[in-house]
């Protein structure tokens, strides 16, 4: 992680991004004092940043209430990430096939701090427990994806993540004891997959396996989310874990063919503006 005290660090850019990130489900719209408080800046600074971000199209201002909210253009950063991620591109055909074979929801997530961020999702055609929009973060300590990722780290790294995590008991089944979680990670290393049964959402059974990079370090995890009303835990582990392990191996070792990738790239080509094409034609 680069040092924020470096002379190369642009504080104003950091603050502008902090203003954008201050908006969430609890603060969908804010006035200038609220923006200043949420971003930890002065009201005059909030006014300048809000004006600039509105001018650039990332915020919009209600003419009557003078409150700001995120504009659709704010999605552009996430959209470009999804388009440019080689991991998502490589994994999508295999995730879709796993979804088809299992008939359950399949997710791909990457680590960010103490959480896993969901970057690809193929919902179950039969039954889905929860709505999980792309970009959603869930804590590592109590999710199968997080435990799959942690199971590939050394003990000191793993313990550091667990100690820094806010180990909230989201459901009666949430395991918060570090010693017991470490034992579950040992089990995940031995079995090749991790599990979390109803620890974040009631009724949600999760299995996950890590994806390793060329260096052998974990880069992501894939997981399957299934309903407790449709599966017994032992049956899910017996039937679904081998499919997860097989899928992770294919993603890591076998690039998808152009034919398999084509449906996931269709519609993403950007045609050149007419003016640019005409300019090229004139120049030639």
Image: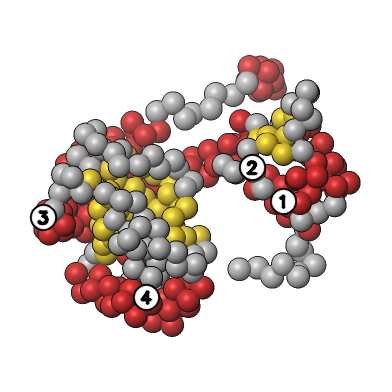
Q: Position of residue 128 (x, y in %)?
A: 29, 39
Q: CA distance from mark 1 to mark 4?
A: 32 Å
Q: Is residue 245 above or below residue 259?
A: below
Q: Nearer the viewer, residue 2 or 111?
A: 111
Judge the density around disc 3: few (<14), some (14-19), many (≥20) Cα neighbours within 10 Å: few
Residue at 85 percent across and 42 percent down: it is 48
Q: Is residue 162 above or below residue 282?
A: below
Q: How many marks?
A: 4
Q: CA distance from mark 4 to mark 2?
A: 32 Å
Name the residue tied to disc 1.
38
Please indicate whether residue 153 sits to the left or right of residue 248 in the image.
right
Label 4 sits on a secondary structure element that is: loop
Task: Tell me if label 3 and label 4 are in contact, CB under 8 Å.
Answer: no
Mark identifier at residue 177: 4
Q: Position of residue 239 (x, y in %)?
A: 12, 53
Please indicate whether residue 243 sits to the left or right of residue 94 in the image.
left
Task: Tell me if label 1 and label 4 are in contact, CB under 8 Å.
Answer: no
Mark identifier at residue 27: 2
- For marks 4 and 2, the one nearer the N-term is 2
- For marks 3 and 4, the one nearer the N-term is 4
Judge the density around disc 4: few (<14), some (14-19), many (≥20) Cα neighbours within 10 Å: few
Task: Tell me if label 3 and label 1 are in contact, CB under 8 Å.
Answer: no
Q: Nearer the viewer, residue 264 or 70?
A: 70
Q: CA distance from mark 2 to mark 1?
A: 9 Å
Please indicate whether residue 73 sits to the left or right of residue 45 in the image.
left
Name the residue tied to disc 3.
235
């Amino acid at each position: 992680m680069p040092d924020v005290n470096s002379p190369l660090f642009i504080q104003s850019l950091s603050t502008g991004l902090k203003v954008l990130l201050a908006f969430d489900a609890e603060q969908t719209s804010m006035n200038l004092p609220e923006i200043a408080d949420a971003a930890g800046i002065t009201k005059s600074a909030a006014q300048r940043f809000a004006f600039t971000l509105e001018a650039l199209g990332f915020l919009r201002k209600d003419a009557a209430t003078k409150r700001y909210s995120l504009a659709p253009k704010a999605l552009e950063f996430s959209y470009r990430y999804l388009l440019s991620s080689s991991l998502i591109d490589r994994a999508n055909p295999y995730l879709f096939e796993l979804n088809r074979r299992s008939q359950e929801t399949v997710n791909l997530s990457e680590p960010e701090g103490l959480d896993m961020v969901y970057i690809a999702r193929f919902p179950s055609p039969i039954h889905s427990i929860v709505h999980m929009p792309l970009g959603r973060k869930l804590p590592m300590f109590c999710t199968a994806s997080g435990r799959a990722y942690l199971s590939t780290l050394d003990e000191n790294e793993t313990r550091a993540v667990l100690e820094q995590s806010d180990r909230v008991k989201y459901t009666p089944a949430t395991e918060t004891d570090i010693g017991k979680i470490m034992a579950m990670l040992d089990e995940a290393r031995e079995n090749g997959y991790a599990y979390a049964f109803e620890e974040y959402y009631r009724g949600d059974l999760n299995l996950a396996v890590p994806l390793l990079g060329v260096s052998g370090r974990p880069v992501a995890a894939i997981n399957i989310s299934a309903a407790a009303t449709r599966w017994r835990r032992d049956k899910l582990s017996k039937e679904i874990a081998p499919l997860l392990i097989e899928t992770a191996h294919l993603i890591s070792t076998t690039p998808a063919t152009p034919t398999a990738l084509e449906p996931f790239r269709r519609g993403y080509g950007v045609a050149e503006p007419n003016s640019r094409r005409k300019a090229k034609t004139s120049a030639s």
